[in-house]
Image (tube, rainbow, N blue to C red):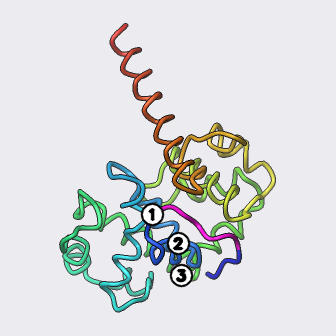
Amino acid sequence: MATSQSPLHLTGDPNADALLSSNANALLIGMVLDQQVPMEKAFAGPAVIAERMGGTFDVAAIAAMGEDDFTALCAERPAIHRFPGSMSKRVQAVCRVLVEEYDGDAANLWERAGTGHELKQALAALPGLGDQKASIFTALLGKQRDVQPAGWREAAGAYGEEGVFRSVADVVDSESLDKVRQTKRAVKAEARKAAAEK
């Protein structure tokens, strides 16, 4: 589970970022939580869960918890997500897959992938991840975690391109975060404009 790459800077919280940098499971669960909340809150979620479970982010323990107990832990204020009920179920489902299929270590998922396409497929098959998140996470692994199976940029699509600021994969500091936010705002504005013209 340990990684030796450069530290990640995704949450603005040194402790939360340290967990993401050193723990593949925490990084993956951050991606699971990354929807309908600010990126920093989503990726800080694993550190909050770890703190409430005694200081360790343990996917086997999460997988083994009663569903109601884990939902209550996630809903405790401040909740890990604006939808703690549905997201706690998703987190727990992914943890169960990690335990059952990857020996409790998300790094095994990417280490087993021979190509970028296989990596993206394996990610997309996880509960609640889907195609877009799998593309973004493939890009994040390639750009910031040195997970670069053949064809990873192609598998990540536009998120894999160099020199762009499209997603969490491109966030390395506050300046790049601002650029990603600008890109997302521009995309949303373009989508609204296109919808209005129909």
Q: Position of residue 78 (x, y in %)?
A: 22, 69
User: Crowding at label 2, few (<14), some or many (≥20) Cα neighbours within 10 Å?
Assistant: many
Q: Residue furthest right?
A: 150
Range drawn in magenta? 5-11
Looking at the rendered image, the quarter that the N terminus falls into is bottom right
Q: Position of residue 102 (x, y in %)?
A: 58, 76
Rounded to the nearest angstrom, the CA distance separating label 3 from label 1 is: 24 Å
The local secondary structure at tag 1 comes to loop
In the foreground, 137 or 9: 9
Rounded to the nearest angstrom, the CA distance separating label 2 from label 3 is: 16 Å
Task: Give the left or right position of residue 113, taking residue 190 as reference.
Answer: right
Q: Which mark is residue 104?
A: 3
Q: Which mark is residue 11?
A: 1
Residue labelled with disc 2? 20
Q: Residue furthest front?
A: 175
The local secondary structure at tag 3 comes to loop
